[in-house]
Amino acid sequence: MSHLELSRRDFIKLMGATSLLASLNGCSHSLIRSSGKSPRVVVIGGGYAGATVAKYLRIWSNTGIETVVIEPKPYFISCPLSNLVLGGSKTLENLSFSYDAVKRNHGIQWIKDSVTAVDSESKKIITERGELHYDKLVLAPGVDFIYDELPMLQDESAQQSIPHAWKAGPQTVNLQHQLNDMPTGGVFVMSIPKAPYRCPPGPYERVCQVAFYLKQHNPTAKIIVLDANPDIVSKKGLFLKVWSEMYAGMIDYRPNSSVVDLDVSEKKVATEFEEVSADVLNIIPPQKAGRVAEDLGIANIDQRWCEVDFRTYESKILPDVHVVGDSVSAGWPKSAHMATSKARVCASAIVAEFGGVDPDPMPVFANTCYSFVSDSMAMHVAHVYRYDPRKQIMLPAEGGGVSDEPSAQEGAYAFDWARNIWSDVLT
Amino acid sequence: MSVLLSTGACADESYARLSIHTHVLASSCSACHGTNGNSVGGTPVLAGLQAEHFIRQMNAFKSGERASTVMHRHASGLTETEIRELAEHFSRQPRVNSSLPPPAKVEP
């Protein structure tokens, strides 16, 4: 049988299976060249998860899968390390990278555009500039914010005054400037939403970074932390130790403190118990899966997060639609490392499916998440996660945990982590 | 398919089957050790590492014989088979120069 006589289905099967197996064996020669008949996977979102899915789809299919990424932003800005911009030891430019290398190195088609609608029946994506057909769709839209409780914070001018800075970008720089301009002895108030939200230790790391800056430049200033959660969500003992030892007297932590009302112009917030006035106010709103997931009706858990099969990351609601990154509903941290690990499981499962091969029945992957407590010292939480076929979820394996204490050695490793994950995701 | 697969080293289908699991697991090491174990620096390059050496180090992390900040957490979470297959996987990876992504051309 010559290649020309193969049906489209057989072609895809053969192409997928052989190239998957070939690349798994370290053989890089292409057994069958990609053609116009290649299956097409469209990835919505070019963050840690989306860029990783795209890269590994191309590598593991031996370029046999046509891969398109739709991302509105012109370049990548890393959320990890972005709290260090507030601390003053990094700039946003240090964390901003071009997509050129990953596009070029792997032949990914990259479309700078915004998705306006997805028609899952006819497998069509409508963007601001046109439309596109897919065989499989991967959603990696990150998080969106929920403003039901604080509708006055929804518009852009309110966010100029009270930035969330929870997506690294202009709001990060805005908050940094506000911190720098805060009056002597002023009050920085930060509100943390109920979990789950993006980056569980992130708000507490931010408290450390704000304190690190203030200790040097405005040492009589205070930080009030209004946490909607009953307790510190991640690395509790470590953060409490750092706050009492490195930043003694600067941080006033108040648990069970949801913000229920807000005066934007006065920068005054109300919780169920009290009113608090701020010189600089940083409200991190509650979060949900990105809008495109919601529009498709696949954010089925609490109407916020997407339920998926953890062997493939296919939506439990819609076939041929996969979800990766922070939009996934899971009992594990929404971290960048997790986002990339999930993305690779998803990519391998898609390549396997096109190749007529079963996906890995029991995926295992690692998560390492560092938090910086100053410009140079960091601490980790790390676990291996293993698929439990009975419970059908990923469970932390034995041996995981947190650092004994923050250290400069772990700070160095945290920067190594950042450089390596940037290299992996973006080259 | 069997014809296409019977090309030298690529013919070992049983290895390939095992490796889907190992391949995905190994790729999750790349956050700290670079794509296919080719670190951009700071952490050890795992690509091309002798399998026996890899297994010895992982077991030493696991037992605490080799002190570590974070590696004992990862080594402890893996089965003996996974460690052996990771060792084989990384020993087969070619060493290549990895690099940081180019900086963005940030709009003023």
Image (cartoon, coloured by chain):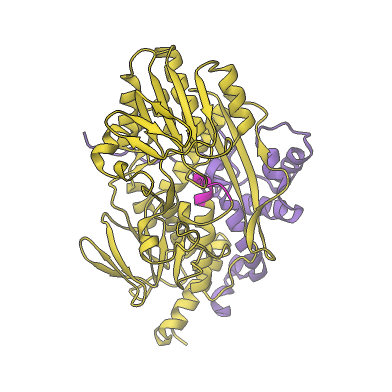
Chain colours: A yellow, B purple
Horizontal side, residue A352 vs residue B74: left or right: left
Horizontal side, residue A75 vs residue B61: left or right: left
Q: Is residue A247 above or below residue A57?
A: above
Residue B49 in view: yes
Q: Is residue B17 above or below residue A374?
A: below
Question: Is residue A412 highlighted in magenta?
Answer: no
Residue A88 in view: no
Residue range corresponding to the magenta coloring: A332-340
Q: Is residue A89 above or below residue A236?
A: above
- Give the x, y percent position of residue A411: 55, 27
Horizontal side, residue A111 vs residue A188: left or right: left
- Give the x, y percent position of residue A12: 45, 77
- Give the x, y percent position of residue A246: 56, 17
Q: Residue sitting at 67 percent across and 69 percent down?
A: B14
Along the line of sight, the residue nearer the viewer: A302 or B72:
A302
Along the line of sight, the residue nearer the viewer: A86 or B56:
A86
| Quadrant in which residue A274 is drawn | top left
Q: Residue sitting at 58 percent across and 38 percent down?
A: A230
Question: Is residue A338 highlighted in magenta?
Answer: yes
Q: Residue sitting at 59 percent across and 57 percent down?
A: B23
**Total count of labels:** 0
- Give the x, y percent position of residue A317: 47, 70
